[in-house]
Amino acid sequence: MRFARAVVKYRVPILIITLLLMIPAIIGMANTRINYDMLNYLPSDMDTVVGQDILLQDFGKGAFSFLVVEDMPEKDIAAMKERIEGVDHVETVLWYDSLMDISVPMEMLPDEIYNEFNTENATLLAVFFDSSTSADETMQAISDIRSVAGKQCFVSGMSAMVTDLRDLCEREEPVYVAVAVVLACVAMMLFLDNWIVPFVFLLSIGMAILLNLGSNFMLGEISYITKALSAVLQLAVTMDYSIFLWHSYNAQCTHTADRKEAMANAIHETLSSIIGSSVTTIAGFIALCFMSFTLGRDLGIVMAKGVLLGVIGCVTILPALILVLDKPLQKTMHRSLLPPLHKFSKGVTRAFAVFLIVFVALIPPAYYGYSQTNNEVYYDLGECLPRDMEYVIANTKLSEDFDIASTHMLLVDAALPPKEVHAMLDEMEQVDGVKYALGLESVVGSRVPEEILPDSLLRILKSDKWELLLINSEYKVASDAVNTQLDTLNGILKRYDPTGMLIGEAPCTKDTIETTDHDFRVVNAVSILAIFLIIAIVEKSICLPFILIAVIELAIFINLGLPHYLGQSLPFIAPICISTIQLGATVDYAILMTTHYKNARIGGASKFQAVSTALATSIPSIIVSGMGLFAATFGVAIYSDIDMIRSICMLLARGAIVSMLCVILILPALLMLCDKLIRKTTLGMKTKNLQMEVSGQ
């Protein structure tokens, strides 16, 4: 209570300090680097990651791109290549004139090599950068190359993809926040009892969001998914706390005419309830930190921090704002649009047997769809971009004109005899889907003597320790075919050189598939266990955690099962995030109703009275909370052109509605069914004089 009275007393200094903190928060937010490369989050000890580091350290090469050049004379291509070589952080550009002078006819090259790099109207250039795939320098170099090369040149590769992704995100992110704010505000204006209090909530939550985004500077960098979603998610999941405080304040005002005393009591009452509510949400986000694919840790830390700051803001910034704006707030009160729900709640409770049947009937199809959706996710990050993006167009041309869907790189021991390297490449070219395998040995021994190879070319493909080889594949990144191909290639590589490494986008993506498949199971188990323990402690019960989690897990199965039945494929990260976020953010609905049920039952009500009363008193809060989460995420899902953002937001929006319906319709039925078991396994309910069940009341 001392803390609550201090907040009321120092409300003006609290607002002044908060406004001053906005300055470093905005500076910190502006200076937090954003990472757009999902493959960056793989464990650092994987061969693919180690190989990328070696490529950068020993060869000075990080990112790699193919350039498709159409309808350009050879002399102009040579001149353009020279200009591209002058772009900052372009380490090497490989084309025909890297092997011999442009005056020498291209027919000097072996036919198989000439045909692979040329069509009737197009030719291929390979560009290596001296910075990593998603480095700011590489993305700037991609933009510069596009400017230098003009409309006849199409840049493919991961760096082109992250460059386009960055540009699209920077255009869309301000709109995400605006859409979420407007729709959340509309939802609150409809379901709350005041016309302007939603704006006060948004001002308070907005300050907490800025503090969260600014403090991300201490993390060094965050992913683009975290940046895009964190503000929207923090708004959606912490809005409840503001609603709790507002309802508590209005209730306290009916008991005392002193507004300051009413607010102090409201803060004290709200603090204990939102701590219990926020702990489950924080636990859901912290569960993401157990992923070995460290994007989960990135999102988990930022969102757990955001929820904590949301709680602090709710009991400090929001009370100060409400007291300062108390007069206009009192003048703009209106009747809630939600009608009294006692008849509805009694009807649902009486029909509990029907909803039990619905619960049992939904489990098999929901779980089947859920398990199939997890098998139907996609890992090709290019799939999340619109079809008219420059990277997508370039990749399409590379695939259609040159039959190249993915490029692998091999690092082999430089001491490996050329004869063995040549034999290895020959063997690899026989693997299904391999278009060709290319190294120094591909030209040496044919029509080009080793002696005439320029030293510059040797330096490009060899270091003291390693030789670099390229393999072009007809199979798409993340496809089953390319993953089988990689297994076969890796087997051949290890026979010739046990220390050799297979790297590139497709090998990294294959590692991502294997890593996240394991992560999904771990994160699910951790989040369920953590929230189970929290519910057990909060409700002082053994069986209630099983009941509450069963209801929300059914909602999750329905939500994640629908994409299978609708024929939709989700980005791989979506099911992992949704399974924990939906559980952590919406189990509060079930906890709220269960707490009301327990209090009524302990107070002497029959199980029918206790359940129907709990349902009637909980529905307004559940609807406001659920519709707030829905509104904040649905608009973003409709607007976004980035499938990863769109999918996560659509799942969150739908998950809010499904969880809301499951809690309102199915939880009362389970409470009715398990009332006797709940009383026997819940502390404080065994020895009370509880009324016997009275049916039909």
Image: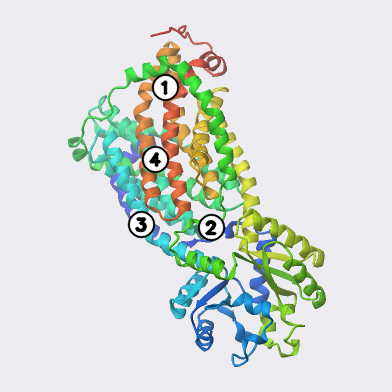
Question: How many neighbours does mark 1 have within 10 angstroms: few (below 14), some (14-19), or many (20 or more)?
Answer: many
Task: Mark 3 vs mark 1: give the one in front.
Answer: 3
The single residue placed furthest to the bottom in the displayed view is 103
x and y, in percent, of residue 5 in the image: 34, 36
The front one of 615 and 312 is 615
The single residue placed furthest to the front in the displayed view is 120
CA–CA distance in space, label 3 to label 1 = 40 Å
Identify the residue position indicated by label 2 in the image.
Answer: 381
Q: Quadrant of residue 200?
A: top left
Secondary structure at numbered mark 3: helix
CA–CA distance in space, label 2 to label 4 = 27 Å
Reading the chain from its start, which is encountered first: label 4 or label 1? 1
Q: Are marks 2 and 4 in contact (CB under 8 Å)?
A: no
Identity of the residue drawn at 43% across and 24% down: 665
CA–CA distance in space, label 1 to label 2 = 46 Å
x and y, in percent, of residue 116 in the image: 63, 75
Identity of the residue drawn at 65% across and 46% down: 518
Q: Amino acid at mark 2?
A: Leu
Q: Are marks 3 and 4 in contact (CB under 8 Å)?
A: no
Q: Amino acid at mark 1?
A: His
Secondary structure at numbered mark 2: helix
Identify the residue position indicated by label 3 in the image.
Answer: 174
Of the 4 image quadrants, the one containing the C terminus is: top left
Reading the chain from its start, which is encountered first: label 3 or label 1? 3
Question: How many neighbours does mark 3 have within 10 angstroms: few (below 14), some (14-19), or many (20 or more)?
Answer: few
Q: Amino acid at mark 3?
A: Pro
Identity of the residue drawn at 49% across and 11% down: 688
Secondary structure at numbered mark 1: helix
Identify the residue position indicated by label 4 in the image.
Answer: 629
- Residue 10 seen from this side: no
The label shown at residue 596 is 1
